[in-house]
């Protein structure tokens, strides 16, 4: 599968593997002409019309009977038969980790809830995963697939992580036990080049799993479901090709690091007609972090975000902070963003430890009712780090027809001394009620064309 992914990357990049050296500055009109071809390549998987109800394999939807083995039997039977639909009927199903297989569509009927156990032991044995851009062996994500082809999670039901202040979220900060020491240990293991198979966490450690993670998969569909209350990131495709996330509701505004959808080192991703209400970034495009990101060295590329609604969150459409493998060709349009707890609408964040590149980001027809910080933020000092050995290459950002109502400021653009942001273009846009001056430092090529702030052309 790895050789196939490399060949696909070459085709998707127009015949060249993407490196900083080839990350040129396409004009916006030419860039947007790429979208139809990307969109045609993103095709949801299809499944045979076989149906395998989990209730036929021993699941009981009473909310108290643990159904982990029943889900495993239904998935195994579906895959062994050549694929089809693992059906979750109306009811509430308590379970541990669910691992998907080739050609399996996990389908939740209206009125169905998959409610995940709060017992960490139900997510063992450890599996190969990523935690904040670094590979390791850790607790299984609640719904997980690794190296699979044609996988889906669909329907009208609810996927409930059941995290709260006393389960999972309490691992995010002091007092102990908390994830802080384990995050430092994992980062050091990666810096030291310790093999992933030897970076074993899980029991006795406190690195939170994701709610949904598809890892090195091809042809992925997540459609229609509502997801809520993840231990951390809600939907996390990693190193995947051909991903559709459509008509999904993420309702997780109170959890720490409860990002909505985080495609990481993925190629050809469509996020369409989704609604996000999150405790962190709504959509965050990522590409690995620091030493481990340089080892894996895979970009995120050809990411389409269309007709989504963003409410609470640290950022509406975000890139970073894990940018080490590079991010290129991100397009977002026809999105509506507004909340007193939405900090920024468009956000790019990285720092001089990340390296990598962030180029060719295109936004148009974005409506922002209110934001709690800057409408647009590009910050190369994330986590207050201004210097380091791996300056990121960030630029080629084009924003058109953005209309913002109320926020403290229109722009926060912070480059690094000696490593500026290179190219931010904003045109035909209106920022109506901005309370404070913009913050713009270490930026080359900040262009405003037909832009009004507080009624004045700037």
Image: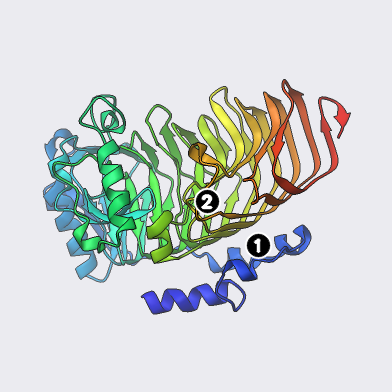
Examine the image and state in which quarter residue 60 appears: top left
- Image spot of residue 139 (x, y percent): 21, 48
Place of residue 223 in the rendered image (x, y in percent of width and height, measured from the top left): 43, 50
Residue 402 rendering spot, x and y as whole percentages: 73, 39
Provide the secondary structure element on which disc 1 rests.
Answer: helix
Q: Nearer the viewer, residue 114 or 320?
A: 320
Estimate the spatial distance between the alpha carbons at disc 1 and disc 2, rounded to whole Å.
Answer: 13 Å
- Is 83 left or right of 38, judged from the image as shown? left
**Counting other residues with Cα less than 10 Å from the Cα at mark 2, is it few (<14), some (14-19), or many (20 or more)?**
many
Q: Nearer the viewer, residue 123 or 392?
A: 392
The mark nearer the N terminus, 1 or 2, is 1
Identify the residue shown where x is 55% and y is 68%.
41
Q: How many marks?
A: 2
**Is any part of residue 209 visible from this angle?**
no
Neighbourhood count class around disc 1 (C-alpha, 10 Å): few under 14, some 14–19, many 20 upward? some
Q: In which quadrant will I find the N terminus?
A: bottom left
From this view, report whether residue 99 is shown above or below residue 216: above
Disc 2 element: strand
| Quadrant placement of the C terminus | top right
Residue under pointer 1: 35
Q: Residue at x 67, y 54 (%)?
A: 395
Q: Residue at x 33, y 64 (%)?
A: 49
* Label drawn at residue 271: 2
Q: Position of residue 122 (x, y in %)?
A: 14, 44
């Amino acid at each position: 599968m790895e050789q196939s992914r490399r060949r696909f990357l070459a085709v998707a990049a127009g015949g060249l593997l993407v490196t900083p050296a080839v990350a040129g500055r396409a004009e916006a009109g030419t860039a947007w002409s790429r979208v139809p071809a990307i969109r045609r390549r993103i095709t949801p998987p299809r499944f045979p019309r076989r149906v395998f109800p989990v209730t036929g394999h021993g699941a009981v939807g009473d909310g108290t009977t643990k159904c982990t083995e029943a889900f495993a039997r239904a998935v195994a039977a579906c895959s062994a038969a050549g694929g089809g639909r693992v059906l979750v009927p109306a009811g509430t199903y308590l379970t541990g980790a669910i691992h998907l297989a080739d050609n399996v569509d996990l389908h939740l009927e209206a009125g169905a809830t998959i409610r995940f156990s709060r017992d960490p032991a139900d997510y063992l044995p450890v599996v190969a995963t990523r935690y904040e851009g670094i590979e390791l062996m850790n607790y299984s994500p609640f719904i997980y697939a690794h190296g699979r082809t044609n996988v889906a999670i669909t329907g009208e039901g609810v996927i409930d992580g059941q995290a709260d202040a006393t389960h999972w979220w309490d691992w995010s900060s002091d007092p102990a036990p908390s994830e802080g020491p384990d995050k430092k240990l994992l980062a050091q293991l990666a810096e030291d080049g310790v093999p992933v198979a030897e970076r074993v966490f899980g029991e006795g450690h406190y690195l939170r799993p994701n709610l949904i993670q598809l890892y090195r998969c091809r042809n992925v569909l997540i459609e229609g479901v509502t997801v809520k209350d993840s231990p951390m990131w809600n939907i996390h495709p990693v190193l995947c090709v051909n991903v559709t996330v459509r008509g999904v509701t993420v309702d997780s505004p109170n959890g720490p690091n409860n990002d909505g959808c985080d495609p990481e080192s993925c190629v050809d991703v469509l996020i369409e007609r989704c609604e996000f209400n999150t405790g962190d970034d709504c959509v965050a495009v990522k590409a690995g972090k620091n030493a481990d990101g340089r080892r894996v060295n895979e970009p995120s590329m050809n990411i389409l975000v269309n007709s989504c609604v963003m409410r609470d969150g640290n950022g509406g459409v975000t890139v970073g902070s894990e940018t080490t493998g590079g991010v290129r060709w991100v397009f977002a349009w026809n999105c509506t963003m507004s909340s007193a707890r939405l900090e920024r609408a468009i956000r790019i964040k990285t720092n001089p430890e990340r390296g990598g590149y962030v180029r060719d980001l295109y936004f148009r027809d974005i409506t922002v009712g209110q934001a709690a910080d800057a409408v647009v933020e590009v910050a190369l000092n994330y986590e207050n780090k201004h210097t380091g050995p791996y300056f990121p290459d960030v630029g080629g950002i084009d924003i058109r027809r953005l209309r913002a109502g109320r926020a403290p400021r229109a722009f926060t653009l912070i480059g690094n001394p000696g490593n500026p942001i290179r190219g931010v273009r904003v045109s035909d846009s209106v920022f109506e009620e901005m309370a404070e001056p913009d913050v713009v430092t270490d930026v080359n090529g900040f262009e405003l064309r037909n832009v009004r702030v507080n009624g004045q052309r700037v």
